[in-house]
Amino acid sequence: MILLIASRKDRASVSMSSKLLEIYDFKAVNDDIYEYKNFRLQIIDRLHIYEDMKNIDGDIDSVIFLSKHSSKADIKSLTVHPIGNFRKAELGGYDNEIVCSNPMKMSASLRYIRNNYNGTDFEVTFEATHHGPYLQKPSFFIEIGTTENEWGRGDIQKIMVDSIINGEPMKYNSYVGIGGGHYSPKLSNYFFENNINIGHIIPKYVHEFIQKDEIENAVKKTPDCRGFLMDSHGSKGRMKQMIREISESYGLEIINI
């Protein structure tokens, strides 16, 4: 079963959960939990990035967090991203600890959004791995950015929740994304033009201090990882060297773009 988490402290999260209940036949288990086919929607009071998610029911295979996206640059975006921290945990989770990604389902959702959003107001893109919470199930965030105006748009809410329910996971090769900025534009563009899935994404702004074992952990927490998709211009030299060493050690592919 796939667990969908919505937070009452997050306007976009509440809006997306309401849209799910409006257009899909979720049945109430109680005031906070609803079920439809192999999906369980749970609405929580705390902000989800700080929620303690260690004790999730054993029948849950993966978790998707419904969320707003905030941007100081007011970038209007429809995004998905893996969870965890490659540096100090300032927004939930633990320092230098990442969560198992879900490349097939996360990639399916973003691919669905791209194929079904026909406007020009939003960028459709991956974000790099960042923030909490910490949990032990394959997980990702799906987000609408970046203000109340965007969070409240019913047409966008529908595309986002449809991507969760109807996005078709494909058994493409999965890769750890390397380099570029927080919104991973080159990685996202390559993804949309090729039959691949993406799990964790390690942006350039952590390349100066990330350690080799953390990169290896990103590989381990990207299920069925085939290798690395690297923004060569957007990656630092020490990172490129570590990627080469890890690839040689584990027999992984490097796609340079």
Image (spheres, rainbow, N blue to C red):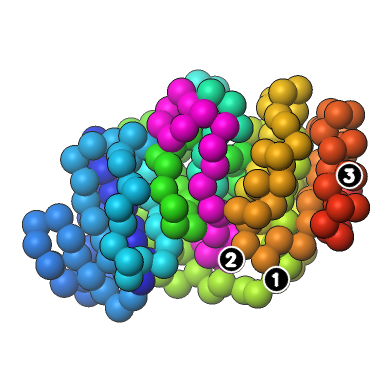
Name which residue lies at 54% across and 42% down: 98
Left or right: where 137 falls relative to 118: left
Query: What amino acid is found at the position of numbered circle 1 in the picture?
Result: Tyr
Name which residue lies at 29% across and 36% down: 47
Q: Nearer the viewer, residue 92 or 57?
A: 57
Question: Pointer 1 and pointer 3: residues touching (CB < 8 Å)?
Answer: no
Name which residue lies at 58% across and 66% down: 104
SS at circle 1: loop
Label for residue 172?
Answer: 1
SS at circle 2: helix
| Residue 175 in sight here | yes
Question: Pointer 2 and pointer 1: residues touching (CB < 8 Å)?
Answer: yes
SS at circle 3: helix
Disc nearer the start of the sequence (1/3): 1
Give the residue number, with chain letter if any, for mark 2. Answer: 104
Distance between mark 2 and mark 3 Cα atoms: 26 Å
Question: Pointer 2 and pointer 3: residues touching (CB < 8 Å)?
Answer: no
Left or right: where 175 falls relative to 44: right
| Residue 32 in the image: above or below residue 72 | below
Mark 1: few, some, or many residues within 10 Å (few <14, many ≥20)?
some
Q: Nearer the viewer, residue 79 or 22?
A: 79
Disc nearer the start of the sequence (2/3): 2
Label for residue 119?
Answer: none
Give the quarter of the image for residue 24. bottom left
Give the residue number, with chain letter if any, for mark 3. Answer: 245
